[in-house]
Image (cartoon, rainbow, N blue to C red):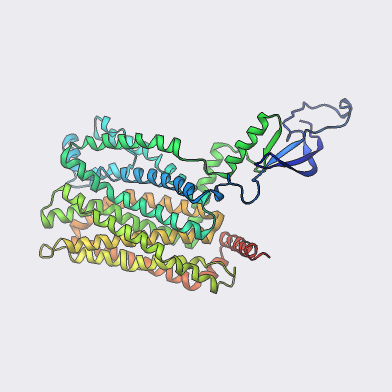
Amino acid sequence: MLHLVCSRRQIASKADGSTVDLGNVPITLEELGIDLYPVSGSQIEGPCVAQESVIVTWDGEDDPKDPYNWSLWKKWQATGIGLLASFVCSMNGTILTVAHTAIGEEFHVSDATFPNSYWLTTSWAIGAALWLAPNFTTLIVVRFFSGGCVPLISDAVAGITSNVFHGDRARSVPICLYVTIYLAATSLGPVVGSSILQFLSWRWIGYIELIWTVALFPILIFGLPESRGPAILRVRAKQLRREGKNAYTTEKTERVALSQRILQSVQRPLYMLFTEGVVFVATVWAAFSLGTIYLFTQSVEQVYKELYGWDSVQCGYIQIAIVVGELLGGGFCILTNPWYYASATRNTEAPGTPIPEARLHASIVGGFFGVTGGMFVYGWTSYTSIHWMAPTVGLAMVGFGTTAVIVGNANYLIDAYSKYAASALGAVGFVENISIAFLPLAAAAMYTNLGFQWASSLLAFVSLALVVTPFVVLQWGKEIRSYSPFMQEATIERRGDSAEAAGV
């Protein structure tokens, strides 16, 4: 193709219909959408006249269409709908765990030597089609393939948060709510499943899942506004093109093959997981903490059945204690935000900007007193001579600690890695899914062979070892960031943000 360079007047369009002339700039005919076949220069006659173009941008910093400028009500409307979707999908992942006895009897699947029924959670899914399953294998396959859709919901909620809330201070509460609701819904699954199973057959769990999942669709379609700024600008540009103007946005969209995009989305998180020590440690810690929540879907029933003679439905109800702990953990994380903001006064790298490592204070408290302490309480109060409320308090403590650990780690990675935070969190999510899929499979063997006390103690000692790592990051955080190319770039961005805020 022949490449010709002309000039064009750039005119920025405002929301009120007025325009601003930005002057003449070079332009290729390809940019204008004019394709020419290869010809010799002598075949081209006359001057090259370019069409007047319009650059579609925001109408100043106060443009009401910019998601950052939405009203607080509209921001929370979008966030709330996203959180509702996350709640439904997360609860569907564990709601079926209490029905393992009924499912095993119908499909002749035994848990005597291995928790085969947990494969339904390992192949976590929305599960709306499980009521059609004619056998146990179909249940696993359906939930496995449906489960691939769950991360899309999670990513969408995280994306909405970053699209409408600008800055770490504004995003702190939404991120905390997202993690808390995700964890609470996960632990609430067995409680809701027990309520259904108490009065109806296990297949009604699938029917009810189908009902609320279908009911969610119109809420998402009609109630969730577009929150991506570039997408909103593209709609503006299309409208102007319908009016005959050559309008475009400043965003350059590269056409990348699907295989290449998949490779890129997998490559960087894995690279950061194995080359960034902070990402590796945060990933292991978060994955272990989340894995214990899913492990309780197996160990709680084993402990309470043997010690107190409870049935599956009663064991499902007792997990409301974990939900209470998780809600308290979410509230604790919100209350610790002032600790983070106060660190701005001692930040010498980017004055006026809070230090990323200050996010870990909540994780340390949650990891030490919550996960570690809760596991010891849960284990060493598991005796028939001790009231069932004692180990239940341990469950609530672990729920509290897990929320604090995951919220603190997520906020730290977001602040420390800035634009690379999505890749860092992608690594965390990848290992978390492995943990919740397979760690609970070892629960029955652990609690049978080691005993209730030492099985929980083993988990507590692992948690105690992991709690040490954030102290290292707190002590040498600045030095650690100086060795990371990803963190160095994020530090430069924070300095720029601080200078901009100061008017420099």
Give the tally of numbered discs. Answer: 0
- Quadrant where the C terminus sits is bottom right
In this view, the residue in front, 342 or 282, is: 342
**Residue 116 visible (yes or no):** no
| 78 up-or-down from 31: above or below | below
211 sits to left or right of 422: left
Report whether 173 appears left or right of 303. right
**Nearer to me, 219 or 405:** 219
- The image quadrant that residue 32 belongs to is top right
Q: Nearer the viewer, residue 445 or 120?
A: 120
Q: Quadrant of the N terminus?
A: top right
Nearer to us in this view, 311 or 501: 501
Q: Percent position (x, y) of residue 326?
A: 32, 58
Could you tell me residue 137's position as x and y percent? 27, 34
Identify the residue at horizontal 53%, vertical 48% (top origin). 70
* Position of residue 41 measured from the top left corner of the image (x, y, whole percent): 87, 29
At horizontal 53% and vertical 51% (from top left) the residue drawn is: 268
Q: Is residue 456 left or right of residue 170?
A: left
The residue positioned 80% from the left and 44% from the top of the image is 23
